[in-house]
């Protein structure tokens, strides 16, 4: 079952974020670290929720198995771009033993329904190049490349 997160869910979210961050740390140790304390991980979610982040949690038997966090991003009109709002899928995580069961796809479909209901015509996300599973999930949901971001260490 997918529900909207409430502050009481923050401990479960923090545990899952630790797992997600461990993946990023393994692949990009020059950018990520896994030394954040439990208090800091919980604060991350409290802060994001306070800033308007929407968090969806997938549960089975009352246990959180995955989550998706997204936010609305407003763009002001410029001389080059039209004003508008888009939904930004900040991150998604499914517990290792629950992957490849369609949970990520269900979370994305629910996110899309909520974003559409909020008046968004599109969503975007950023996927690290090492995370082929996430890229496959996003492409399976119909997302297509829009921008190539390049990085060069100095």
Image: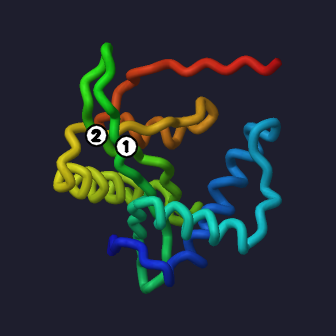
In front here: 2 or 149? Answer: 149
- Under tag 1, what secondary structure? strand
Farthest top residue in view: 80
In front here: 93 or 88? Answer: 88
Q: Which mark is residue 73?
A: 1
Query: Split into 4 quadrants, where in the image is the C terminus?
Result: top right
- Establish if 134 lies above or below 21: above
Query: Split into 4 quadrants, where in the image is the N terminus?
Result: bottom left
The residue at the point 59 percent across, 34 percent down is 128
In front here: 122 or 43? Answer: 43
Q: N-terminal of the two: label 1 or label 2?
A: 1
69 relative to 154 in the view: left or right: left
- Establish if 12 lies above or below 32: below
- Establish if 83 lies above or below 72: above
Q: Which mark is residue 85?
A: 2
Contact (CB < 8 A) between labels 1 and 2? yes
25 relative to 72 in the view: left or right: right
Query: Disc 1 and disc 2: Cα gap in Å?
Result: 5 Å
């Amino acid at each position: 079952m997918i529900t909207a997160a409430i502050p009481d869910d923050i401990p479960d979210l923090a545990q899952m974020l630790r797992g997600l961050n461990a993946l990023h740390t393994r692949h990009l140790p020059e950018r990520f670290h896994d030394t954040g304390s439990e208090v800091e991980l919980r604060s991350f979610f409290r802060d994001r929720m306070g800033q308007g982040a929407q968090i969806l949690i997938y549960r089975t038997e009352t246990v959180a198995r995955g989550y998706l966090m997204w936010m609305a991003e407003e763009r002001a009109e410029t001389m080059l771009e039209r004003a508008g709002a888009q939904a930004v899928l900040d991150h998604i995580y499914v517990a290792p033993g629950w992957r490849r069961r369609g949970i990520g796809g269900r979370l994305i479909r629910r996110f899309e329904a909520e974003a559409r209901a909020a008046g968004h015509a599109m969503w975007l996300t950023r996927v690290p190049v090492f995370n082929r599973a996430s890229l496959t999930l996003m492409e399976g949901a119909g997302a297509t490349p829009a921008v190539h971001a390049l990085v060069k260490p100095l």
